[in-house]
Image (tube, rainbow, N blue to C red):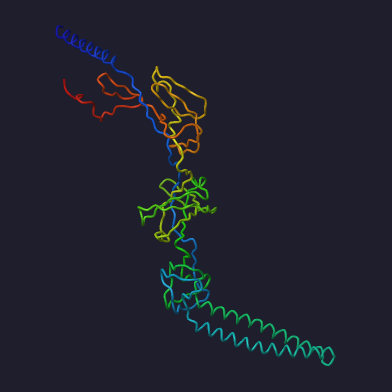
Amino acid sequence: MNKKKIILIGIALIVIAGVSVWIFSGSTIRHKISYVTVPVEKSDISNSVTATGTIEPVTEVEVGTQVSGIIDKLYADYNSVVTKGQLIAEMDKITLQSELASAKATYDGNKAEYEYQKKNYERSRGLHEKALISDTDYEQALYNYEKSKSLFDSSKAALAKAERNLSYATITSPIDGVVIDRAVEEGQTVAAGFETPTLFTIAADLTQMQVVADVDEADIGGVEEGQRVSFTVDAYPNDTFEGKVTQIRLGSTSTSTTSTTSSTSVITYEVVISAQNPDLKLKPRLTANVTIFTLDKQGVLSVPSRALRFTPEIPLIEKEDIVNDCEGTHKVWTKEGNTFTAHPVTIGISNGMKTEIISGITEGIQVISEANIGNSSANGQPEMNANSEKSPFMPGPPGSNKKK
C-alpha cells in the first residue's frame, strides 16, 4: 500500500506542475496580426488560351501540268527564287507536236472542203431561186454545205486543243516566289488522269507567314480577330514570335481519342494568325506552340484581386483599431497607425490574379492585400497562426528536443 501511495502522490505532483506551467505561460502569450500591403502600380493584365499550330506561307501555289508525258528539262530546284512567267520546266514535246500537226492537217482539209461546199451551195441557191435546178439538187447542196461546216468547226476546236496541250508542255511560274518543294525529276513520266500531278510548290513571300492553329471548342468562344498572339517553335526555343489573329474559320475538325474505358471526340477550330518573318527563321511546316491573349491590357493601374476582397473585421483587426468605412461596390483599404480607411474604386478587367483600377486611388499608395493571424509568446518564439498546422516532420525551436 505504501508503494501505491507514493506512485499516486508522484502523479499528482506532475499534474499540478503541468497545470501551473500552462497557466503561467498561457498568460504571457499574446495575439498578433500582421498585414501584407502592396502598392497600386501599373502592370500588364492578360488572360490567354494555348493551342498547337503549323507555320505556313500566306500564299502557296502548287504548279502542275494538264498533259501526260515525260519531264524533259527542269529549270528550277528547291529554294530557287522565281518570277511570274519564268520557265521552270519543259516536257517532251514530240508526241504533242505530232498531234498538233495531225490536227492542223485535218483542219486544212476540212477548211478547203467547207469553202468549196459553201460556194457550191451559194450557186445552187441562186439557180434554185430561178427554178433552174430541182429541189433535190438544192437540198443536196445545202446538206453538203452544213456537213462541211460542222467538220470544219470540229477540226478548228481540235486544232485549238492541240495547240493548248503543246503550250502546257512549257511550264512557267504563276507567281513571284520561292520553290519550297519539287516533286519530279528529269526523265520522270507524269500522268494527268483524274487529277493534275503536282510538279512544284511555290510560296509567294516567306517574309510574311501565317500560323494555322487548332483551338479547342472550349476556348474558341474567347478568341476574336485582332487579338495579340505569341508563339514559339522547337527550332528556336529561346525566341518568342509575335502575331495577330486574322481569321477564325467556321469549319471544325473532330478527332477521336480512345482510352481503355471510353472513346471521346475532340472538336477544334482553325485560327489563322499572321506573323512577320523578316529574318526567315520561320520555315514552312514548323510546329508552333501558340498563346492567344483573349484578355490583354498593358501598363494599366492595378492591384492584386485579393486586395478587393479584404475587409477589416474581427478577427482580422484588434479591438482598439479604428475603421473608416465608405459606400461603394468595390473598395480597397489602407492602414495608418491603428486606423483603417476604405477607398471606393472603379474597376476594369480582371484575370483573377490582378484587377484594373480605373479610378478612386492613385499610383504608389500601399493597400492591404491580406492579413495573417498568429501568436507569439513572451520569449519571442512565434506560434502557429490560426490557419496553419504543425507538421510532425518540421523541426521545432532550438532546445525542444533536449532531454530533461
The answer to whether one can see residue 159 in this image is yes
Residue drawn where x is 44% and y is 67% of the image: 178
The reply, left or right, for residue 138 in relation to residue 64 is right
Name of the residue lying farthest toward the bottom: 132
Q: Quadrant of the C terminus?
A: top left
In the rendered view, tell whether residue 280 sits above or below residue 68: above
Residue drawn where x is 33% and y is 22% of the image: 32
Image location (x, y in percent) of residue 27: 29, 14
Image location (x, y in percent) of residue 19: 25, 12
Name of the residue lying farthest toward the right: 131
Residue drawn where x is 53% and y is 74% of the image: 66
In the rendered view, tell whether residue 363 sits above or below residue 401: below
Image location (x, y in percent) of residue 259: 41, 48
Q: Quadrant of the N terminus?
A: top left
How many badges with numbers are in the image?
A: 0
295 or 143: which is nearer to us? Answer: 295
The answer to whether one can see residue 265 in this image is no
Image location (x, y in percent) of residue 302: 45, 36
308 or 197: which is nearer to us? Answer: 308
